[in-house]
Amino acid sequence: MACNGCSSASKLDFDFSMAFQPIYDAVAGRVWGYEALVRGLAGEGAQQILSRVTPEQKYRFDQDCRIKAIELASRLFPAGEELMLSINFMPNAVYEPAACLRATLRAAERYSFPMSSIMFEFTEDEEVADTAHLQNIISEYRKHHFTTAIDDFGAGHAGLGLLVDFQPDLLKIDMLLVRGIDTSPARRVVVDGILGIARELGITVLAEGVETEAEFSVLQAAGVRLFQGYWFAKPAFEELPRIRPRSLGAPAEVEMSVGVPTPA
């Protein structure tokens, strides 16, 4: 199986790598997984790299990001740990879902990385005009036991309307709704509404961009299970950062390692 996009994609004229940021499971008291974030070889931010991607390179860039993330994670993730690898993808860069997954499947096989440990998240920052096409993508991913997620939920093009057409496994609440939620009744009401909808649809919620203990406490009390943000750890270039102990109320001399329960 092949598609025109797969065969005609332009090669990249630049190189890049990945940083990793932990996702913390507040119920299990451990690191749940890591999101792979695009970086330049000197640690340049994602926007500097994305600005270099031409329309003709979009497909190749999307494919190369998946392969790079899987390659690095296969080396960095501790053996025997059940950790998720979260990879961003661009729906508009996927032409024929089954054909466009071939490089991902080959990479998972080459690096002996379990497909059930891969989560694909797409951002609402990229408008998806063809919802049926997106549904086909998600359906194909689920055939291979990939987890699916909507990133930046509540701050993009589709919002609640997208949930009417399909339900991902996970919603990542955008940091604009998280920031200052401890002092914003309006944010708490909106987030409570999202959590209620997610419960009814059987979707797990992740709060991203958590930067303070107060934000974490309010969100945890509201029923959020998964967390990501500087309060726990900043992204680390080509390595897995430890969760900072002060973010979880641990003694100052204790550091959270991958997969280790939170110290009492």
Image (cartoon, rainbow, N blue to C red):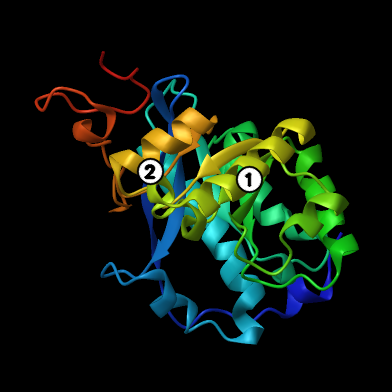
Residue 72 as seen in the image, left or right of residue 173: left
The dot on residue 215 is 2
Q: Residue at x 28, y 36 (%)?
A: 243
Identify the residue under disc 1.
Answer: 171
Question: Mark 2: few, some, or many residues within 10 Å (few <14, many ≥20)?
Answer: some
Q: Is residue 50 left or right of residue 158?
A: left
Query: Label 1: how many residues lie within 10 Å, few (<14), some (14-19) or many (20+)?
Result: many
Of residue 33 and residue 110, the one placed in the foreground of this image is 33
Percent x, y of residue 152: 57, 58
**Vertically, is 201 above or below 264?**
below
* Element carrying mark 1: strand
Element under label 2? helix
Rendered-image quadrant of the C terminus: top left
Q: Is residue 237 visible?
A: no
Q: Amino acid at mark 1?
A: Leu
In the image, 104: left or right of 79? right
Query: Which percent across, then down, holds residue 39?
Result: 37, 66
- Image vertical order of residue 193 relative to residue 201, above or below: below
Q: CA distance from mark 1 to mark 2?
A: 18 Å
Which residue: 60% across, 64% down?
A: 155
Which quarter of the image is occupied by the N terminus? bottom right
Looking at the image, can residue 216 be seen?
yes
Q: Position of residue 176 (x, y in %)?
A: 48, 60
Decide which of 100, 19 is in the foreground and name it.
19
> What's under tag 2, amino acid-wise?
Glu
